Image (spheres, helix red, strand yellow):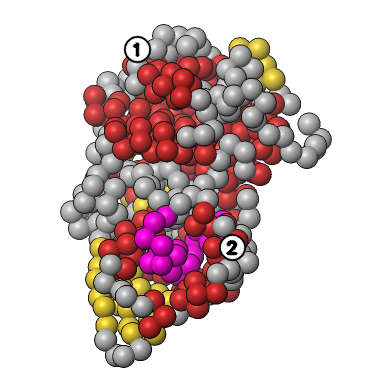
Amino acid sequence: MKLHEVRVHPSKSDLTRDHQLAWKIAQVAADKVAVPRDVTGMIINRIIDNAAVAIASVNRGPVITARDMALAHSRRGGATVFGVPGRKTVSPEWAAWANGTAVRELDYHDTFLAADYSHPGDNIPPILAVAQSMERNGRDLIRGIATGYEIQINLVRAICLHEWKKDHIAHLAPAQAAGIGTLLGLKPEVIFQAVQQAVHVSFTTRQSRKGEISSWKAYAPAHAGKLAIEAVDRAMRGEGAPSPIYEGEDSVIAWMLGGKDAVYHVPLPEKGEAKRAIMDSYTKEHSAEYQSQALIDLAFRMREKITDFAAIKHITIHTSHHTHYVIGTGANDPQKMDPKASRETLDHSIMYIFAVALQDGRWHHVDSYAPKRAQRADTVALWHKISTTEDKVWTQRYHAVDPAEKAFGGRVEIEFNNGSVLIDELAVANAHSLGAHPFERADYIRKFETLTDGIISARESARFLEAVQELPDLPAGELDRLNVALPANAVQHGKPGIF
């Protein structure tokens, strides 16, 4: 890996493209390096993971809306839509919109946390949609996805967006564009323009994850994918982009991020170096914000030592700056303590999540968020006894470069009315690669079968799992086999719109 210094340059300096981050990203995307076997295996795992959570959410409101919009843009030889038989295809940007929303709706797929947040599995829907539409083969798709993960994860390692109240899709869209460039074997000059366009159009504010969090949280990465496909399409037709998009005098760094004096150091693979970033990401065992994963597992462990939940006086969660200020009481969002809050808000409230996990000893992607569950009197009482506080040790571990030190958990102190205190801590979730039970292929398959049980047929489940595990050998024109369809008439439809 090589660190690339990125900072603002005045227009008069006439910064050459060789010194621009977007060009360096394009060069990485255009590098036809082989994909290692373990990376290929992990890409297959994440395609399974995405399909699992997409089908589990297939008839939820936002997904229905996104799918209906996509189905209004049918195209022969286009891309498939989750839930719909593969013979019906739509324009790829709309397939990316529908499938990206389905993947993101439950907040239940993979994650990477560093200087910023990310869900790199969001790269898969648009890259797959283009691969299907352009009749690419399984190995092309694998190469494209490897690039998408590589670019997004390395941007996330280096450039903080949330500090400047920008949503994390600003790192996602250029990664998706780069991944599509790799998939299609585009020249660096074309990828360069597509990446810059994708950056330019994808900067949005973090209000999508603040206060009363709405369904837009599910749409945001899908919107990035749609924008990325359109950016690549324009660039392929010879159109240019605002340049230099990162380093310019009126660029995103100058006015949307750290400002004219900011300096970032972005790691990218050297020429000929394998793209392995996906191996540093991790999926979720529980349907909740990633920073709650270890704390859910910790709640399961601590509850075994509690005989009377009503005897709890107060619970303090000592954790990182990010966890405290994003999903903890440090956010100062009253909605995070509101029993009538939306599901999207509850899954960003560690106080609610810890209370329910402590009481139930289980976590379910539907039941744990049900209004009846959130409004249960004893749960509300316990929930409101929980607060978070930043602990510098956990903040340091959150930002640690050494994987053995990096942690997203915390220390929990439960104080009882009689003065006794129960203390325990957990650094990483059980499903993490360094956790008690790291996720492997069998776990991804189990997650898929569990989440899709009763929604798709056993035959369709077996067909998909067989196809996806043959991904490296899937020929051109057969990537529609990676779609998962519901039985006839099981796909629901929503309110009409313009399309």
Q: Is residue 288 visible?
A: yes
Give the position of the C terminus as an image quadrant: top right
Task: Reply yes or no: does residue 330 show up in magenta.
Answer: no
Mark 2, residue position = 372
Relative depth, front residue between 285 and 150: 285
What's the CA distance linking mark 1 and mark 2? 48 Å
Residue bearing the label numbered 1: 473
Residue 131: x and y in percent read 49, 19
Q: Which residues, given as a range, are shown in magenta?
A: 344-363
Measuring 66% from the left and 38% from the top, which residue is drawn there? Answer: 64
For mark 1, give the secondary structure. Answer: helix
Magenta span includes 346? yes
Q: Nearer the viewer, residue 441 or 159?
A: 441
Q: Residue at x 59, y 62 (%)?
A: 372
186 over 428 or under it: above or below: above
Closer to the observer: label 1 or label 2? Answer: 2
Q: Check residue 260 in the rendering and tell me which mark sits there, or answer none.
A: none
Residue 84 percent location from the top left of the image: 61, 24
